[in-house]
């Protein structure tokens, strides 16, 4: 069958766990870190995040050729820059070592600390040219700040010029108080609301006019955007026409859906409904969806069965299972 590459596969390095769990946490991030420290230290999740031999055995068992690894969310972003910047470097060195040891089985997305945009920009350069990783993952907001804000321009410029795809992964929403009941903060709803908001800020702010070659990757089949895309276009045009720049509407060179189809690539992480996949293919295009499991949070066997059983054309199947990931992340077979 087709080569299978999964592109949102989370790990924690021992170095990360030992250091991050001692750091002071940015005030608004306390609840999320209290939860993630339980997840990261309690079996079986701890082993699932750290044991790469077990990961390889599972990959072999289900017929998964490759995993694109990334640090467990929210990574280094909840910590003061003085701690987060060196920790990101250490994590990236570890990821590069894993890829060197298993070049046919693992690729990796580097991590950066947007808290210090200049250091983050330099780290993007190191991730791509020295460590030869496949891009970077940023876990949505950093202390309530979003990547369309002007202080992050050097980071986006660096990602664009190094051809580093930026995987925008969810985390707890920044407006946490409104989500703090019933588990709404997490993957039930808040993750998608947060990452979808972040992606819409990138689209509507005009940063993609400034950085037209930036590639942004979204999990969860586009964090709701494919479902809303026609209305987003239609209402953006309506608001621009009737309100002008009132309500902070920005004039854009393209329509929202044109940015979505030009600058975004999405993945199937956590999404196994064939009808939603079909809708997403229509919204973004046949060569812009990649397979992802979201290990260790989702069941690898169930997810791979979805890939095998979902009705697809031959081109869609090949793109989804490996070809788009090979193109976007530069993952080759040898
Ligand atoms: C995810 O990445 O989907 C995830 C987490 C943490 C808890 C649950 C979950 O990062 O689904
Ligand atoms: Zn994930």
Image (spheres, rainbow, N blue to C red):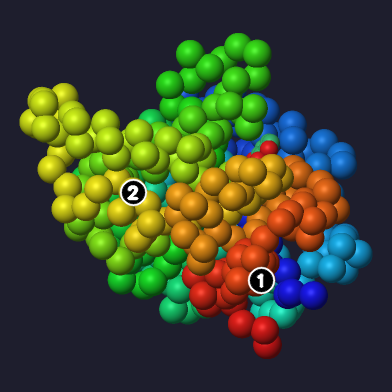
The kind of secondary structure element at disc 2 is helix
Nearer the observer: mark 2 or 1; the answer is 1
Q: Residue drawn at (55%, 33%), measured in percent from left and top?
A: 191
- Distance CA(mark 2)–CA(mark 1): 26 Å
The quadrant the C terminus occupies is bottom right
Provide the residue designation for mark 2: 257
Q: Residue drawn at (39%, 61%), measured in percent from left and top?
A: 215
Q: Quadrant of residue 235?
A: top left
Is 219 placed above or below 4 here? above
Of 61 and 304, nearer the camera is: 304
Provide the residue designation for mark 1: 314
Give the crowd class for mark 2: few <14, some 14-19, many >=20 residues within 10 Å.
Answer: many
Q: Quadrant of residue 63?
A: bottom right
Q: Is residue 272 left or right of residue 254?
A: right
Tell me residue 33's x, y (percent). Answer: 61, 31
Is 155 placed above or below 225 here? below
Q: Residue drawn at (51%, 40%), measured in percent from left and top?
A: 223
Is 96 placed above or below 185 here? below
Q: Earlier in the sequence, mark 2 or mark 1?
A: 2
Q: Is residue 179 left or right of residue 306?
A: left
Of 309 and 185, nearer the camera is: 309
Tell me residue 287's x, y (percent). Answer: 51, 66
Tell me residue 43's x, y (percent). Answer: 87, 39
Q: Is residue 282 left or right of residue 276?
A: left
Q: Is residue 176 left or right of residue 332?
A: left
The quadrant the N terminus occupies is bottom right
Q: Quadrant of residue 158?
A: bottom left
Give the crowd class for mark 1: few <14, some 14-19, many >=20 residues within 10 Å.
Answer: few
Is residue 19 among what the camera can see? no
Residue found at the far bottom of this picture: 334
Quick check: which quadrant has ligand 1?
top right
The kind of secondary structure element at disc 1 is helix
């Amino acid at each position: 069958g087709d080569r299978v590459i999964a592109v949102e596969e989370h790990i924690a390095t021992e170095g990360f766990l030992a250091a991050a769990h001692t750091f002071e946490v940015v005030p608004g991030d306390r609840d999320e870190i209290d939860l993630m420290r339980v997840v990261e230290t309690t079996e079986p999740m701890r082993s699932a995040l750290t044991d790469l031999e077990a990961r390889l055995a599972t990959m072999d068992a289900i017929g998964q050729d490759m995993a694109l690894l990334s640090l467990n969310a929210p990574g280094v972003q909840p910590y003061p820059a003085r701690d987060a910047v060196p920790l990101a470097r250490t994590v990236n060195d570890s990821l590069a070592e894993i890829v060197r040891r298993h070049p046919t089985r693992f690729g990796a997305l580097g991590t950066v600390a947007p808290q210090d945009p200049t250091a983050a920009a330099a780290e993007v350069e190191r991730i791509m040219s020295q460590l030869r990783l496949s891009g970077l993952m940023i876990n949505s907001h950093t202390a309530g700040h979003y990547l369309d804000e002007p202080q992050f321009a050097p980071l986006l410029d660096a990602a664009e010029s190094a051809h580093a795809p930026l995987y925008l992964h969810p985390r707890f929403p920044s407006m946490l108080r409104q989500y703090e009941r019933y588990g709404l903060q997490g993957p039930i709803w808040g993750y998608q609301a947060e990452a979808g908001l972040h992606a819409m800020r990138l689209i509507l702010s005009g940063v993609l006019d400034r950085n037209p070659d930036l590639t942004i990757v979204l999990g969860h089949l586009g964090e709701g955007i494919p479902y809303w895309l026609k209305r987003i276009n239609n209402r953006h045009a309506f608001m621009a026409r009737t309100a002008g720049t009132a309500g902070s509407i920005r004039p854009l060179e393209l329509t929202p859906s044109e940015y979505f189809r030009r600058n975004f690539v999405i993945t199937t992480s956590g999404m196994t409904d064939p009808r939603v996949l079909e809708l997403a293919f229509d919204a973004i295009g046949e060569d812009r969806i990649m397979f992802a499991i979201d290990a260790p949070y989702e069941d690898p066997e169930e997810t791979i069965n979805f890939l095998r059983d979902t009705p697809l054309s031959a081109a869609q199947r090949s793109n989804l299972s490996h070809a788009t990931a090979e193109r976007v992340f530069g993952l080759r077979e040898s």
